[in-house]
Amino acid sequence: MAAADRRRQGRDQSHRRTPRAGVPRPLKQAPDMFDLTIPEELVLLQDQVRQFGAAVLRERHREFEAAGAVADPVRAEYAALGLAGMELPESLTGAGLGTLAKALVLEELGAADPGAALALDALGPALYPLAELGGEATLTRYALPLLEATDARALLVWGDSERPGRRCPLIRGGRATGTLPWVPAARADLLVILDTQGAAVIESGFRLTPVKGSGLRAAGAAELVLEDAPLSSHWENPAGAERALARWRLYTAALLTGLMRTAAETSREYALQRVAFGKPIAHHQALAFLIADMHSAVDASRILVQEAAWRADAGLPFADAAATAFVEAAEAGMFVAPNALQIFGGQGFMQDLPLEKYLREARTLALMAGGIDLARDLAGAAVADCTAGFALSPLRAEDA
């Protein structure tokens, strides 16, 4: 037998090889297999939001940044799309579309202007503690009035019941005290504090003092101060708090994915137009590799976000997947955004172009939902099967 025939026969029979001992054959269809197919109705919704973001938000992002708010006509257009209550159950006049639908919408809004996306979303991620810990009665009491108002905002902040030395709101004895030097809101009609043990709702006893923020300026920026603020509602439910935090991470990671997508596409278009040494700079190998890596990072982030969202909608455990998606999005954002600016060179720092905004907002989004280190702690503990956690775990001996 000729050598070529032997190689061909080996390739033809390679799929019949017996697996190594201890390595199971892959299942043809695992019960929790992630389906990459996006339903047609969600594709149509995604297209609508993409058009709205490109035509309205992206064109006016500097205006929104300067004002620290989104114009009322834009709010009306957003409401007309039916996005305000898309995650609320149908029994509460919502669309009941679920986590994956929200992730798709947030990616498109993040691609246009993540700060404006936060400003337009009256409930925002504050919806998740209300839904996970309070249920429909709580949503009726707190969420529906905000959706019916013209210009209302609920603000979700991360507290810390485990390490009182940090500058985070603390819940003690039916009261909340603490300071956050920056929150992405100039005003709030409702404040929700989420920590590892549960959540609390505060309607009075807090103040927001405007500050000059760096990123997400369209959402506003303020220092939050709570001085013995009374709790309107309080729930202690660590499992519910974990789910709410996971949904908050997916919310933020989806915005980051959209932001990265725009940054990568903008830099690619420029690199195809800018000519150096007789050809577009995108045709030089070093830059071509960099642009390819940037787009790969965006795709990886998107897949992780959508998988975690799909798991949430399927009723499967998703906290670890959400933490991993958030870490990937935050890390990828700090790879894509700086390099997108670098491709433009010095002009990337000018406000005539949006590159410097992408960089500011990628860094700011990575600070939300408890921050990247807390998410990495959970993701790392899951990978290492370490139930006690690592450096940030409240179960450390020195914190006991």
Image: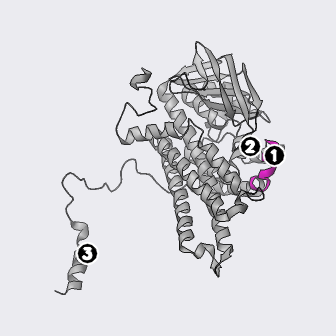
Cα gap from disc 2 to disc 1, whole angstroms: 8 Å
Q: Which mark is residue 217?
A: 2
State which region is magenta.
57-70
* CB under 8 Å between discs 2 and 1: yes
Q: Nearer the viewer, residue 40 or 78?
A: 78
Q: Is residue 213 magenta?
A: no
Question: Where does label 1 land, which residue?
Answer: 66
Q: Is residue 278 above or below residue 259?
A: below
For badge 1, the amino acid type reads: Ala
- The quadrant the C terminus occupies is top left
Residue positioned 64% across, 27% down in the render: 192
Which image quarter: residue 84?
top right
**Label 2 element class:** helix
The x and y percentages for residue 350 are 75, 57
Q: Residue 174: horizontal and vertical position, in percent?
A: 60, 14
Instruction: Check the image and name the residue furthest to the top.
Output: 173
Q: Residue at x 57, y 46 (%)?
A: 253
What's the amino acid at mark 3?
Asp
Q: Of helix, strand and loop, which one carries label 1?
A: helix
Q: Main secondary structure of the magenta part?
A: helix
Apparent side of residue 229 relative to residue 172 in the rendered image (left or right): right
Give the residue pinned by disc 3.
Answer: 12
- Residue 347 sits in which quadrant? bottom right
Q: How would you rate the neighbour count of disc 2 (Cα within 10 Å): few for under 14, some for 14-19, many for 20 or more?
A: many
- Where residue 135 appears, as percent x and y from the top left, is 57, 27
The amino acid type, in three-letter code, at marker 2 is: Arg
Q: Is residue 107 visible?
A: yes
